[in-house]
Amino acid sequence: MLLGNDAPLGVFDSGLGGLTVVRALREACPRESIVYLGDTARVPYGTRSAETVVRYAIGCARVLVRQGVKALVVACNTVSAVAIDALRVEFDLPVLGVIVPGARAAVRAAGAGPIGVLGTRGTISSGAYPRAIAAISTRAEVIGQPAPLLVPLVEEGWLDGEVPELVVRRYLEPLAEKRVRSIVLGCTHFPLLKSVIAKVSQSLSSDPVAIVDSAEATAEDVVSFLAERDLAAQRVPRDTSLELLVTDLPKSFAEVAARFLGHEIENVKAIDL
Amino acid sequence: MLLGNDAPLGVFDSGLGGLTVVRALREACPRESIVYLGDTARVPYGTRSAETVVRYAIGCARVLVRQGVKALVVACNTVSAVAIDALRVEFDLPVLGVIVPGARAAVRAAGAGPIGVLGTRGTISSGAYPRAIAAISTRAEVIGQPAPLLVPLVEEGWLDGEVPELVVRRYLEPLAEKRVRSIVLGCTHFPLLKSVIAKVSQSLSSDPVAIVDSAEATAEDVVSFLAERDLAAQRVPRDTSLELLVTDLPKSFAEVAARFLGHEIENVKAIDL
């Protein structure tokens, strides 16, 4: 087990969506090793009670803490919305989520204009983004748009063409009417549809609209955090490792995971929670 | 609690999809009272292990048995595929599922031609329909087509127009190439897209293709079963009742449930399992 700065980052999500955060981390801080846990047996968390989500999140975090991770990255909007504080109380290490970095980047990109948030129905109705944005800018107007079809589109691998464009258009029209100036991708699945979302958004608005990828925003947040705390890994990138743990190994796993990571996967281990 | 023939039917599903079976039952046997349980807190079952599905199914069935139902109708493809036998061992009352009636109707409609099955990824990979069809006709060729986007389309209420037509076309093309003569809607959500599926199927094939609604096939099966066993209700339809139990009451519940039942809903009770 590696200790100190060279210990891995622990990243977890209710399923595979959090792999977009892993991908962004690999680009933003290639020296860091990562252990990823996807709770694929209990996905999705969005339909469960807050108590249950907290319990599941603590279970996931415990596995990663036992692997000796130096910090926890919660790559799941649902857990970031309801369980971050409980995780900080339970574990004696830094815990970073996806919502605050996305909110911060959205406020920065929107200037004084309204901010749109695309998310699952659960994330939008939780109000987590409006709360996080209000804590940064009291003036910002936030328009939430549930976009439940985007998750299955990504899982099917339908990432461009007629169907995704029509679906995305239907979700973006209400945001365009409100003249939003930035749109947060408030679900870890959505970065895979970023180019379609950018294209459709551009076709709906005469002014530029920034698309905020919360996976990238989170990775940048992790980099700054590690630098500030002097926790960044020192070893060379080729010595880093990526270990993937899942609680259930569905047949389509390798295919879907490769889509999220942008390359073939290896070292997947099924564990019990 | 009503006893004997006037006792209600107990219908359950992992979520709301089974309400299409309730709707079909209301039409096929309007004298029957119904208690419906949707395990909305633990939906979807399709991603869970067989042991877990059996345990959940027994929990659901127990609630209905305590309500004094005269028979159990399993309005869930996943439970029908893996837990029917366990339910029959556990409870001393008739248990009917959705797969056998759909399989039987598909064989009848296909003549000697190939049969297509549309279902969730879980249902298709379980092989439950090919097994059920093989038990009826050893000659029948079965082509399974996972259609995971149809469930969220139904839950979003996108039941006609460009998006559903394009999505359905993409799933039906491989079936049309194999010249299937009947297509089973092997998921309780799909009957809501029946008219789109019929329209697209017709546009892809010069020969007629029968669309088998497994909710309707199940309701017909229940009617025959009750008649054979002399268990049909005797009272007049206006004295029947429909009680809905759910394990979680999401905000969008009323809207989605009304879509499945075809009318506004009342009498919804949230219970713990």
Image (cartoon, coloured by chain):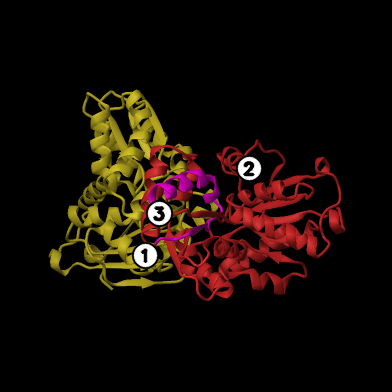
Chain colours: A red, B yellow
Q: Is residue A203 magenta?
A: yes
Q: Residue at x 85, y 53 (%)?
A: A6
Helix or strand or loop: what does disc 1 sit on?
loop
Q: Which residue is mark 2?
A: A261
| Rendered-image quadrant of the N terminus of chain B | bottom left
Q: Is residue A104 left or right of residue B170?
A: right
Magenta-drawn segment = A179-204
Q: Amino acid at mark 1?
A: Ser
Give the answer, above or below, for where A237 lies relative to A21: above
Callouts 2 and 3 in the same chain: yes
Residue matched to label 1: B252
Instruction: Name the residue tied to disc 3.
Output: A172
In this rendering, the label closer to the viewer, 1 or 2 = 2
- Residue A191: % across, % down: 55, 49
- Mark 3, Cα crowd under 10 Å, few <14 / some 14-19 / many 20+, is many
Query: Which of the two residues, A98 or A258, is positioned nearer the viewer here?
Result: A98
Helix, strand or loop under label 3: helix
As measured in the structure, the alpha-carbon distance from the residue carrying label 2 to the one carrying label 3 is 26 Å
Q: Chain of mark 3?
A: A
